[in-house]
Amino acid sequence: MQGIITSNISNQYQIEVNNTTYEAVARGKFKIGEITPVVGDSVEIEVIDEEKKTAVINKILPRDNYIKRPKLANVERLIFVISASHPKPDLLLLDKQLVFTEFLGIEPIIVINKMDLGKEEIIEDIKKIYTNIGYKVIETIAKEKQGIKEVRNELQQGISAFSGNSGVGKSTLLNAIFEKDLTKEGVISNKNKKGKNTTTAIQLYKLEEGSYIADTPGFATFDVYEIENKDLYKYFRELKEEEKNCEFVGCTHIKEENCGIRKALEEGKISKLRYQNYVKIYEDIKDKEEHKW
Ligand SMILES: Nc1nc2c(ncn2[C@@H]2O[C@H](COP(=O)(O)OP(=O)(O)OP(=O)(O)O)[C@@H](O)[C@H]2O)c(=O)[nH]1
Ligand SMILES: [Mg+2]
Ligand SMILES: [Zn+2]
């Protein structure tokens, strides 16, 4: 039988097979082998007890992609949630995450939540930056269920995962999409020190046939560090376009004369904010490289 892993806590897995959930463990061989099953994996299972709905995982089917932190396989799209205010938009994190989706070949969607709180001009500027380079941006007020249909429309097939800083409204968005309070259903939520509900584990929720949504604790430490800094520009779409105009092979696009990317920046073709984040991430990767040894 074939199913999909919808949750995993240590060696306990929930597998969904045609609307039935089995509790499964992974065969011992997975511990020895290189890969362990993770949420999002399609797996072959062997039923141990049909009445108790217990099973073992025998095989992991080939993955489309794999995200390390948090561990998730076969993600079709990532929805990056920022909030217009409280907390203020974290565009450095957003750009890091966009680099990551470009790197992995996952479709990104940007949601600006808490539109009731933000300053309009600032939000318009942010929206322009990202729509100009071809990203889909959706504005929402999750608390008032505004913009929810538009988000839902994007989640028609495959696995989608929500990501973003704590407090931006990911769980509130999910509850609005599913029209129920998911945090009351299972293990995903814990009260933190301030008594707020905060997401602690990954769980896939079935939205409709063939479409699953993951609420995650956030991808705050997104691993851009497996990208070499000399390649970083390739994952900034608009920078990649201009690189052909750089004079020097191996141009870092930071200090060089006759750099096509810096020229485009001066001409206003590239957003200053995006370029600044390129430089920050570049330096970040460089620091990590130097401290590796
Ligand atoms: N004003 C306003 N508040 C919102 C909106 N959406 C969510 N909130 C509030 O923001 C707070 C945080 O929302 P959550 O949905 O828990 O945020 P989260 O991203 O899931 O946070 P973590 O689970 O900690 O990562 C809650 O108090 C929500 O009620 C919105 O559109 N407008
Ligand atoms: Mg949450
Ligand atoms: Zn250059």
Image (spheres, rainbow, N blue to C red):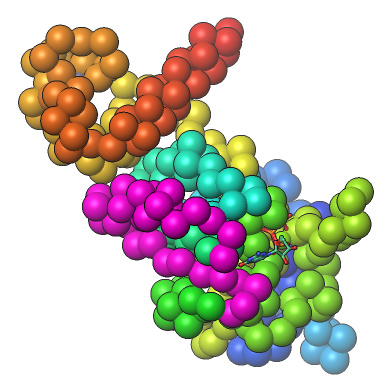
Can see residue 110? yes
> Vertical placement of 203 versus 31: above or below?
below
Q: Quadrant of the N terminus?
A: bottom right
Choose top left, top right, bottom left or bottom right for residue 34.
top right
Question: Which of the image's four quarters has the C terminus?
Answer: top right
Answer whether residue 132 is magenta in the image. Answer: yes
* Residue in the image at 20% along x and 10% along y: 256
Which stretch is magenta? 116-145
Where is residue 131 shown, x and y percent of the image? 29, 56
Residue nearest the viewer, comparing 239 with 138: 138
Please say if 99 is above or below 257: below
Residue 189 is covered by the magenta coloring? no
The quadrant where residue 249 appears? top left
Where ligand 3 lies, by image quadrant? top left
Q: Position of residue 168 (x, y in %)?
A: 63, 56
x 70%, y 44%: residue: 32
Report the front residue among 104 and 36: 104
How many tags in the picture?
Answer: 0
Q: Nearer the viewer, residue 100 or 75?
A: 100
* Residue 55 visible to the viewer: no
Drawn side of residue 279 relative to residue 287, left or right: left
Residue 278 lies in what quarter of the image? top left
Residue at (40%, 52%) from the top-left corner?
Answer: 121
Q: Where 20 falls versus 105 (above or below)?
A: below
Front position in the image: 117 or 153 = 117
Asked if 94 appears above or below 109 in the picture, the reply is above
Q: Position of residue 181 (x, y in %)?
A: 75, 79
Direction from residue 234 to residue 154 in the image, left or right: right
Residue at left offset 65%, top offset 73%: 143
Could you tell me residue 50's position as x and y percent?
80, 89
